[in-house]
Amino acid sequence: MEEESLASESSLNNSAKSEKRILIPREEIPWFPTIDYEKCTGCLTCVRIDKETGHDVFEVEGNTPRPVVKNPFSCVVGCQTCAKMCPNNAITFPSIDELRKILKELRLKYSQ
Ligand code: SF4
């Protein structure tokens, strides 16, 4: 199972720094792009960036250039590069505040 380290707690103990890492399965974190096909013009900028970075989140579907989110959980948590590069604002993510809230809940769940 692919896991992602999302939280750490640091404390100083006798001058030695210790760190507790919490592993949360990536599939539990609802962070991935959503494409609004009313806005998407099929320029494939998102797909090009995805291939350049090697994340493999998108693929092109059908004969017409249409990006689809093939591997949502390959998306790097917190990254919004494809949305920022889309010339038509066709890609959205949850808000950072929503992400923080979800991560806080998951940290509690997986630290027990
Ligand atoms: S960058 Fe935006 S407009 Fe271009 S293919 Fe991707 S979603 Fe569509």
Image (cartoon, helix red, strand yellow):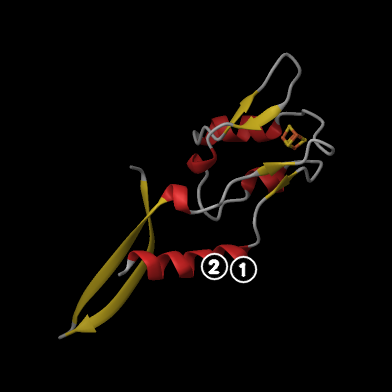
Residue drawn at point x = 33 percent, y = 74 percent: 9
Horizontal and vertical percent position of residue 59: 60, 26
Q: Is mark 2 within 8 Å of ligand 1?
A: no
Residue contact between numbered discs 1 and 2, judged by CB atoms under 8 Å: yes
Relative height, residue 10 to residue 62 (above, below): below
With 32 as the anchor, is 107 left or right in this view?
Answer: left
Q: Amino acid at mark 2?
A: Arg
Instruction: Estimate how packed mark 1 is, as few (under 14), some (14 to 19) or many (20 or more) residues with alpha carbons within 10 Å.
Output: few
Q: Which element carries disc 1, helix, strand or loop? A: helix
The quadrant the N terminus occupies is top left
* Label of residue 100 in the image: 2
**Circle 2: element type:** helix
Which residue is pictured at 52% across the width and 64% down the height?
102
User: Along the line of sight, which residue is nearer the eye, 97 or 110?
Assistant: 110
- Could you tell me residue 5's position as x and y percent? 36, 57
When asked about the image quadrant of residue 57, the answer is top right
Q: Quadrant of ligand 1?
A: top right
Query: Which class describes the residues within 10 Å of circle 2: few (<14), some (14-19), or many (20+)?
Result: few
Q: Quadrant of residue 36?
A: top right
Mark 1 belongs to which amino acid? Asp
Asked if 29 appears above or below 112 in the picture, the reply is: above
Query: In the rendered picture of this protein, how many numbered marks are placed on residues?
Result: 2
In this figure, which residue is indicated by the disc labeled 1? 97
Residue 67: x percent and y percent? Answer: 68, 29
- Marks 1 and 2, how far apart at CA: 5 Å
Along the horizontal axis of the image, is 72 left or right of 64? left
Residue 11, position as x, y percentages in the image: 27, 80
Q: Report the residue that reaches farthest toward the bottom.
A: 14
* Left-right relation of 20 to 31: left
Q: Which residue is painted at 43% across and 49% down in the image?
A: 26
Residue extending farthest to the right is 38
Residue furthest toward the top? 63
